[in-house]
Image: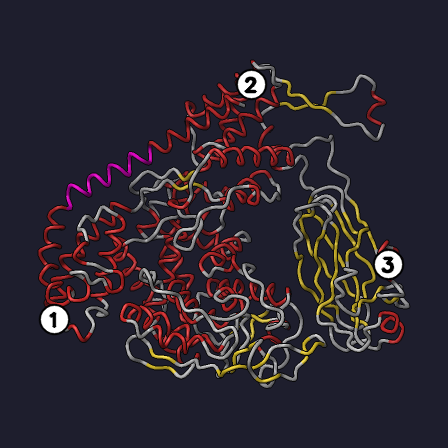
Amino acid sequence: MKTFLALITRRLSAASIWVGSIAVGLIGTSASTMAADTESLHRTTTDLFARFCNDCHSDGESEGGLDLGSLSDDLVDARTFATWVRIYDRVRAREMPPADAGEFSGDDIAAFESAIGPALVKAGRAQSGTVLRRLNRREFENTINDLFGTQLSLARTLPEDGRSHEFDNIGEGLGMSMVHLQRYLDAVDMVMDASVAMTEGPPESGVKQSSYAESQEGKKFIGDVWRAAEDGATVFFEDYGYPSGMLREATVETAGWYRVRVTGYAYQSQKPITFHVNLTSFQPGSEKPTLGYFAFPPGPPTTIETTWWMEPRSMVEITPWGLVAGQHNERQKRVRDYPGPGLAINHVEIEGPIVDPFPGRGHQLIFADVDRRVIEPRNPKDKLVSWYKPKFEIVSKNPIADARKTFRRIAETAFRRPVDAPEIEPYVDLFQTEMSGGATIEEAIRTGVAAIFCSPDFLYFREPAGWLDDFAVASRLSYFLTRTLPDDRLMAAAKSKRLTTQPAALLEQTRRLLASDQHQRFINEFCDAWLNLRDIEFTSPDQKLYPEYDPFLQYSAIEETRSFFAALIADDLPVRNIVKSDFAYLNNRLAKHYRIGIGEIGPVEGPELRRVSLPPDSVRGGILSQASILKVSANGTNTSPVVRGVWVQERILGNVPPPPPPGIAGVEPDIRGASTLRQLLDKHRDLDSCRSCHSVIDPPGFALECFNPIGGYRERFRSLGEGQKVNLKINDRSVEYRLGPSVDASGQMPDGRSFAGFAEFRDLLASDEDALAKALITKLLTFATGREMGFADREMIERLVTKSKVSGHGVKTMIELVVTSEAFRQK
């Protein structure tokens, strides 16, 4: 083990030196050529600042936290560079100087841009593309599981990745430590243990049928809490919490893929009954995934089926949704006399484990080049006893040659490129060292394989500065669109060098990956980061204020956003749909929450999300009105126009507002409900140091005030203090909240255009498609390349926006433009 760790440590150190030399070289070159530009910058800005800016930003004055008198012109310094970029942007956008300080003339602005722009471009180029990027923990998990054919939750065992520019795959935020290395080693060992065959044949597969009527739970609760139907089904009339719908008999002992079938029907109901199927376990720390939400119609029993990876001793759990027994709350009376609807479950079937082929992918990856045999027991009858476990050995006339062949084949797959013979020798040396220490051939091979998957050649994207070669492009494309290593077809295109020489070939692979099953990973992970869906569980809505919030709503809200964005790509819909669309992806839970399904649309029934056309006057449609977005941009109690305004500026418009100046206190909501946060912000904006930023931040926040923290539309705020009593029951319980002040969703854009509410604000936002396209293209480039798009990338991004406009700003077209851009194909 010490030899292994020493090998990997040396190789990681070498990688750090390699990337460090690139960074030093680029920065050094930039510093030596920047002096003339800095002199021009200083000469031009001194006069302009003296005439228009110094009264507020010099000689002891530092409005907005900016003191021009102490501002350095050393653009190599990241903090100084960022300040100059902020000045450049505010002047270019005509936000500064303010009207009461005079205005730059056209000649002044032209001189300002020509002096600052080139210097910032050079400095920006020196600071971009120099960070060695490693796989983040989700990319590591996807890659390892795909290579070995496993389904292990490896990401949970690894240190959390740093976030930068909203994403957790940005090189500058992805550090490396000995803790990482040890966790990688543990993860690879787990995968090899799970994938290496330790039996002579595949695990026995079969079908197990279970029913609540014959279960431990059934014997205890049927007749008391659950009803026994005449056909033998067990009927649930409510989600009791306890007893849950756990079915101990519907369990598995071997990890693997299983088909789970549930048979049942809607009992005493004219409408379908919705329910969800979970996996649960008594194992501490085990995952309890939701397999999905389904519905049984009334009439004869029907069957739903889903395929899922199940860990040993995990059990099926079935829970109805939307059923409330109401006045029949005494259990004996409910079971005996209750005439209301229920969920009848006849039985549950589990088929598996599904194994094809045997041995599995990981086993073949490791042992394809060696002869691994069963060690026959001395007494053949030993095979007949229940406790017999076969032992294996590798038979080889030349173990070193076999190990060398194995390591090279695995390394070419793991490193995502051809591998030269000398690169394999350190792993062969490690193999020999292990053998000399008494390890078996198999143990020594496993050590070498672990070293390969803990090597910087696997853990990092090895991308030297300049134009990328075909294999680096293939890796970028694959990890961008499928979040895993290139498949065989993409590697074949890279080997033929078509990805860098034939734009049509690169687009062909892009479109193929966009249509693949694994593309859903991109949808999930990009939306989770870009829109911050990964923090959907960061807060829990106050059940007194929002008693209608439930797990089904949260599940549906996330799927709505992902389905919507997937549709934008699949149909190449215009980017304006992000803020305004004439359709939404809904199911019965979202339709109820959004109050949709009455009048023109008709009822939206069933838990399956489907595309639904919206009436012209609907406030829904587009990402901004989706429950997932409205939840992650609020806390569980109230909303903040500032928080939501910053969210819209950063995520949708691509503008990062500066932090508040030092010493400026934040604005806290009045939890009593006596006043709105808008009223408090009116006083806050009277401060000179706050006005300019809040004129940009607050308008979208005000517009979104018509939505509460869980995405429901509102005309008045809810309160647990002052306000009007509400005569309303949710889940047969009277609500505790009161109605407070009226919502004012009006506002004024920075350019003076006003809006009366969310619908008008949405129209204003959707009218500037170029701004929406620029923001989304920048987000896609950041996610695809693993680095921030800096000042030097602006011209290139503008060109992409211009090309996108020609085709109507289709979202799929934007992805194709990103893939063919110089930023994507260069380091």
Tell me the residue that label 1 is attached to. 105
N-terminal label among 1 and 3: 1
Task: Indicate whether residue 28 is drawn in magenta.
Answer: yes
Q: Give the SS element for disc 3.
A: helix
**Overall secondary structure of the magenta stretch?**
helix
Say which amino acid is labelled 3: Gly
Front residue of 560/172: it is 172
Front residue of 788/58: it is 58
Tell me the residue that label 3 is attached to. 218
Q: Position of residue 695 (x, y in %)?
A: 32, 73
Name the image quarter holding residue 275: bottom right
Q: Which mark is residue 434?
A: 2
> Residue at horizontal 56%, vertical 71%?
611
Q: Position of residue 56 (x, y in %)?
A: 19, 66
> Residue at horizontal 71%, vertical 52%?
280
Say which amino acid is labelled 2: Glu
Give the side of residue 188 with respect to residue 378, left or right: left
Q: Position of residue 196 (x, y in %)?
A: 65, 32
Give the side of residue 433 with respect to residue 310, left or right: left
Quadrant including the N terminus: top right
Q: Give the SS element for disc 1.
A: loop
Name the image quarter holding residue 438: top right
Q: Give the SS element for disc 2.
A: helix
Measured in 3D between alpha carbons, the distance from the residue under mark 2 to the one under mark 3, in whole angstroms, is: 56 Å
Q: Position of residue 13 (x, y in %)?
A: 39, 30
Say which amino acid is labelled 1: Ser
N-terminal label among 2 and 1: 1
Which span is picked out in magenta? 18-34
Measured in 3D between alpha carbons, the distance from the residue under mark 1 to the one under mark 3, in whole angstroms, is: 83 Å
